[in-house]
Image: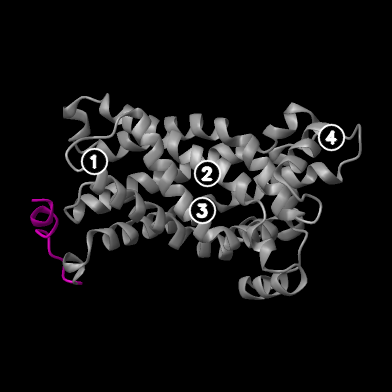
């Protein structure tokens, strides 16, 4: 029944004949491209804020998001805000595609006849993110190092080669536990709030021409809640990936952040990260759902 529905729309490019999971991958990749390009500066500012903690002496004035933004523009010019965009693209384009294709496949397999409840939505989103996160972690490590400003890498491939030669391939998976503790709960919480918010909308609104705008608003609300819940894991992940030699275990990075900066240290960079993750997720889901609808697939 589903196959017949999925095969109805035909496109000139031949996408109509593609497997639904491949269509989901392509829609996700395109949505990831748009959101990554727009919000990369926020990710760079977030990384700089988190790594600045280590270089500040006790009693130094706090460094805020705006001051980091201005410093980057002054010292590295405007395009310096997009430093690390190449590894971001290498991570997000296939990574978001893998996430959405996994999400679509799992949803079709387990929830073809009904919508998942809140708990199932958490597992669905978290499981899909784990698959994408593990697959793309080496590129995530390189992206974080590019943005930190501590490494003079010329290209993504050169950076991968350098890490393998000087630190070993294992360094490309530094921060795996912290990354999964950050990304899986974020996606799970996000999908739960997003699906519940959309379900609460009147049918007249969700089926009107305003649906993309309303969906984006639901995505923003879900993103804020999910970002705040997973911010501590993001701080730990950044520390482990920028300075893997200092932390042999995730708990070592947790102890360092707490001993040096207290509980507040776990929320360093929360504003730029919340803005970026919230807007990126809201845009990615909105674009993904619109593209999937045009292809005749239920997202």
| Secondary structure at numbered mark 2 | helix
Q: Which residue is mark 1?
A: 111
Question: Contact (CB < 8 A) between labels 4 and 2?
Answer: no
Q: CA distance from mark 4 to mark 2?
A: 25 Å
| Secondary structure at numbered mark 3 | helix
Residue 278 visible to the viewer: no
Q: Residues within 10 Å of mark 3 (few under 14, many from 20)?
A: many
Mark 4 vs 2, N-terminal side: 2
Question: Contact (CB < 8 A) between labels 3 and 1?
Answer: no
Closest to the camera, between mark 3 and mark 1, is: 1
| Nearer to me, 227 or 37 | 227
At 67% from the left edge and 68% from the top edge, which residue is drawn?
169
Q: Is residue 234 above or below residue 62?
A: below
Q: Residues within 10 Å of mark 4 (few under 14, many from 20)?
A: few
Q: Which mark is residue 235?
A: none
Closest to the camera, between mark 1 and mark 4, is: 1
Q: Is residue 135 magenta?
A: no
Q: Which residue is mark 4?
A: 260
Q: Which residue is mark 3?
A: 133
Mark 1 vs 4, N-terminal side: 1
Q: Residues within 10 Å of mark 1 (few under 14, many from 20)?
A: some
Q: Quadrant of residue 118?
A: top left
Prevailing SS of the magenta stretch: loop
């Amino acid at each position: 029944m589903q196959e017949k529905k999925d095969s109805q729309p035909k496109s000139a490019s031949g996408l109509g004949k593609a497997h639904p999971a491949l269509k989901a991958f392509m829609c996700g990749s395109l949505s990831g491209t748009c959101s990554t390009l727009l919000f990369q500066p926020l990710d760079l500012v977030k990384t700089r804020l988190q790594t600045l903690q280590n270089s500040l002496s006790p009693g130094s004035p706090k460094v805020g998001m705006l001051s980091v933004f201005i410093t980057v523009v002054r010292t590295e010019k405007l395009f310096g805000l997009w430093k690390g965009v190449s590894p971001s693209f290498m991570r997000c384009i296939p990574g978001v595609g893998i996430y959405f294709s996994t999400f679509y496949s799992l949803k079709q397999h387990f929830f073809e006849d009904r919508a998942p409840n809140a708990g199932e939505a958490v597992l669905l989103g978290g499981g899909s993110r784990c698959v994408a996160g593990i697959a793309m972690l080496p590129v995530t490590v390189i992206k974080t190092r590019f943005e930190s400003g501590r490494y003079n890498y010329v290209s993504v491939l050169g950076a991968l080669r350098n890490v393998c030669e000087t630190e070993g391939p294992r360094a490309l998976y530094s921060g795996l536990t912290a990354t999964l503790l950050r990304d899986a709960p974020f996606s799970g919480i996000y999908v739960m709030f997003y699906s519940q918010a959309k379900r609460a909308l009147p049918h007249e609104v969700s089926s009107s021409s305003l649906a993309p705008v309303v969906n984006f608003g639901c995505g923003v609300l879900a993103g804020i809640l999910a970002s705040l819940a997973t911010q501590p894991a993001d701080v730990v992940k950044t520390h482990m990936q920028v300075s893997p030699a200092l932390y042999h275990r995730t708990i070592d990075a947790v102890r360092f952040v707490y001993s040096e900066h207290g509980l507040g240290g776990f929320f360093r960079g929360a504003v730029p990260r919340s803005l970026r993750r919230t807007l990126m997720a809201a845009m990615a889901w909105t674009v993904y759902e619109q593209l999937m609808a045009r292809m005749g697939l239920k997202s």
